């Protein structure tokens, strides 16, 4: 039997660094975190890409 590969945290870190604009739970989380609407989060993702840092920066700036 083949030995199972050791799981790393690399994939998790990469996933947390992104906002999936099409997934309701991610948009909802970001919306609650920043105090902005879900549509504002989606617009920010479309405008600046799916990098969480850039999306949060954009949402903070628009206040």
Image (spheres, rainbow, N blue to C red):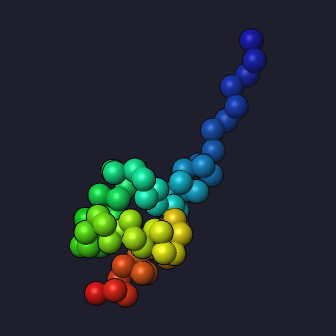
Whole-percent x, y for residue 9 in the image:
59, 49
Residue that appears at 58% across and 57% down: 14
Q: Is residue 2 visible?
A: yes
In this view, the residue in front, 53 or 22, is: 22
25 relative to 52, above or below: above
In this view, the residue in front, 23 or 8, is: 23
Whole-percent x, y for residue 60 in the image:
35, 83
* Residue, far right: 2
Position of the C terminus, as image quadrant, is bottom left
Residue that appears at 46% across and 56% down: 20
Whole-percent x, y for residue 41 in the image:
36, 68
> Is residue 18 found left or right of 42 in the rendered image?
right
2 relative to 50, above or below: above
1 relative to 16, above or below: above
* Residue, far top: 1
Whole-percent x, y for residue 43 in the image:
39, 71
> Is residue 60 found left or right of 57 in the rendered image?
left
In this view, the residue in front, 55 or 47, is: 47
Residue that appears at 43% across and 58% down: 21
Q: How many circles with numbers are drawn on the protein?
A: 0
Residue that appears at 60% across and 49% down: 11
Position of the N terminus, as image quadrant, is top right
3 relative to 25, above or below: above
Q: Is residue 31 visible?
A: no
> Is residue 32 found left or right of 46 in the rendered image?
left
């Amino acid at each position: 039997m083949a030995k199972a590969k050791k799981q790393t945290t690399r994939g998790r870190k990469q996933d947390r660094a992104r906002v999936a604009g099409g997934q309701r739970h991610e948009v909802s989380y970001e919306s609650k975190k920043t105090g902005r609407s879900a549509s504002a989060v989606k617009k920010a993702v479309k405008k600046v890409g799916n990098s969480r840092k850039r999306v949060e920066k954009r949402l903070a700036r628009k206040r």
